[in-house]
Amino acid sequence: MNVEFVEALNELCKTRRIKKEVLLEAIEQALMSAYKKNFDSNSNARVTLDAVTGEVAVYAQKKVVEQVENPQLEISIDNAAVDNKYQLGDIVEVEVTPRNFGRIAAQAAKQVIVQRIREAERGVIYDEYIEKEAEILTAIVLRIEGKNVFVDLNRTEGVLEPSQQMPEEEFHVGDRIKVYVMEVNRAQKGPQVMVSRTHSGLVKRLFEMEVPEIQSGVVQIKSIAREAGYRTKMAVYSSDSAVDPVGACVGQRGTRVESIVNELRGEKVDIIKWSSDPAEYIAQALSPAKVVGVFVNEHEKAAKVVVLDNQLSLAIGKEGQNARLAAKLTGWKIDIKSQSQMEESMGV
């Protein structure tokens, strides 16, 4: 190896963002292994790589003794004490660089460099995608293995596990879908990106992309409750009294919410107006049911809700879904009664 090698190494470290000291140390370790494998497996040696000239040298570390019994590990006092520098028991370094070590060293260095380039690329990709956590990416379905769906995220792959797939959603190779980046982990073969189609963050990000008023900060998404593939409830608030937060999210003739529903394969999305008044907020959350009255218990954060008799099933929803999502959206325990049930319990 020579000066050209060092110059190439410097350029590599610069472009690939690899620390030169770390790379040189790794190369020296590889050279040491190569020396022991090809020349002397029993010697106590070290290999140096000059960071300026690129010259490689091997030094055997030998103990100064009266009489040599093991030439690989020992050197006589007569040979060591040429300049009276060493005494018995000292460790002497003697250069033992083999004549043809350069070719082997170059091959070993190349293997280390290739490995470190791969590691560096994986590191760069990890850094890129860790910044995309909680974001939406457009992905293309690459392959389907069992129930896992692997998607192309441009520079790496994402994994869509069964638990993160919407019910009855079918995928085909080549499908273009929107996914939510849940988590990015380091892995031996590169970053492992876990993506989701069921996370409530997917709905949040879709509205942020679709609604300019949310992008500008005028309209805020206060809370989202989702049962993926079936229904989502989203509470929104406007800091500008002139802007209707629900209308902004729905869009003219429902165009904005419609595009999001299409992306979610027909999942219903209820958009309600957030309120700092718990009773009003809970009543809104039970939409589309019409609420007659809400009685809140601040201490227990529980509410009794009264609806007209013909609105009870609507308020509760199929298999309790509407009531369940409303409770999740507001963070309150909700007990729903029809007007006749409430009157009966009161003895009216």
Image (cartoon, helix red, strand yellow):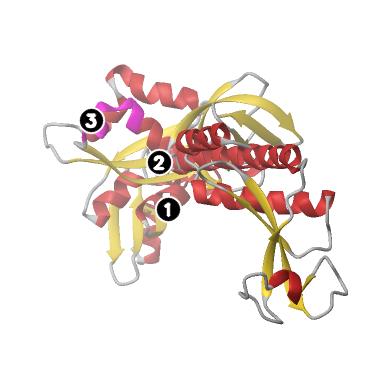
Give the mark count. 3
Q: In this view, does 253 lie above or below 217?
A: above
Task: Answer whether residue 212 is magenta in the image.
Answer: yes
Q: What stretch is highlighted in magenta?
A: 208-216
Position of 56 relative to 5 (above/below): below
Q: Is residue 185 visible?
A: no
Q: Callout 1, which amino acid?
A: Lys
Q: Is mark 3 on a helix, strand or loop?
A: helix
Of marks 1 and 2, which one's residue comes earlier in the chain? 2
Q: From the top left corner, tell me how far across and down residue 343 is, in percent.
A: 35, 60
Q: Residue at x 70, y 71 (%)?
A: 80
Q: Earlier in the sequence, mark 2 or mark 3?
A: 3
Q: What residue type is labelled 2?
A: Lys
Camera-near label (2 vs 3) is 3
The residue lying toward the viewer, choosing from 87 and 162, is 87
Marker disc for residue 213: 3
Name which residue type carries label 3: Glu
Residue 295 location (% of width, % of height): 29, 61
Q: Is the magenta stretch mostly helix, strand or loop?
A: helix
Label 2 crowd bin: few (<14), some (14–19), many (20+), radius 10 Å: many
- Residue situated in front as seen by the camera: 186 or 279: 186
On residue 233, which mark appears? 2
* Mark 1 touches mark 2? (CB < 8 Å): yes
Q: In this view, does 313 lie above or below 210?
A: below
> Residue 156: where, in percent of width, then height?
58, 32
- Report whether 328 appears left or right of 167: left
The label on residue 328 is 1
C-alpha separation, residue under disc 2 versus residue under disc 3: 19 Å
Q: Which of 331 and 157 is in front in this view?
A: 157
